[in-house]
Image: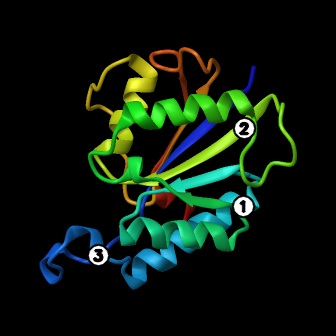
Amino acid sequence: MTKVSIYFIRHGIAADRAGYDRDGDRPLTEEGHKKTKKIARKLNHLGLKFDLVQHSPLVRAKQTAAIFAEQGYPIAQSEYLAPEGDFQKWLDWFRNWQESGISPGINGGGRSDLSLGLIGHEPDLSAWAEVLLWGEVRSVLVLKKAGIIGLAVPEPETPIANSLLFMLIPPKILL
């Protein structure tokens, strides 16, 4: 059985909505770029390795993922991570990925542990984490921009209400 650590990472600080017709077009601000780069470097320096980092198709999430890619993390876009993305379809993908033990960045399969980063948006990321933790959304986890929630998912068959919270870090801790 393959155990997985999932890191829910909120995109960095983005431009104000007022300047954009479509929310999905909002890029990271200069401050958002700088802070996100510091955080990605810090995670890499601390030895955190991702086998895969999935990201939302929105501009600010793509830019956040590109910053993580600069640290050597393999990235892939996932439509499921767009705002109001389909958690059940992502969960089906996740179970297959976890059971195979194979992803970009992994040489061969059959590993006993994997690490997955998910770059997306609120309130979806914290809601997904809460479902994996408690089987329901309780609206108690708070994920700041460029913040991280870490969960250990021990069972591919039953990740819902069977995961363990091991990390909840606001960005200021890593800056």
- Location of the N terminus by quadrant is top right
Query: From the viewer's perspective, is 37 left or right of 125?
Result: right
Q: Residue at x 58, y 16 (%)?
A: 157
User: Does any portion of residue 151 appear in the rendered image?
Assistant: no
Q: Alpha carbon of mark 2 to alpha carbon of mark 1: how far?
A: 16 Å
Find disc 3 in the rendering and name its residue. 26
**Residue, disc 1:** 44
> Which residue type carries mark 3?
Arg
Label 3 vs 1, first from the N-terminus: 3
Q: Amino acid at mark 2?
A: Leu
Residue 124 visible in the displayed image:
yes
Q: Residues within 10 Å of mark 2 (few under 14, many from 20)?
A: many
Residue 94 is situated, as x and y percent measured from the top left of the image, at 56, 34
Q: Residue 119: horizontal and vertical position, in percent?
A: 47, 55
Q: Is residue 34 above or below residue 69?
A: below
| Residue lying at 62% horizontally and 44% vertically, measured from the top left | 116
Residue 4 vs residue 28: left or right? right
x 73%, y 52%: residue: 49
- Regarding mark 2 in the picture, which secondary structure is present there? strand
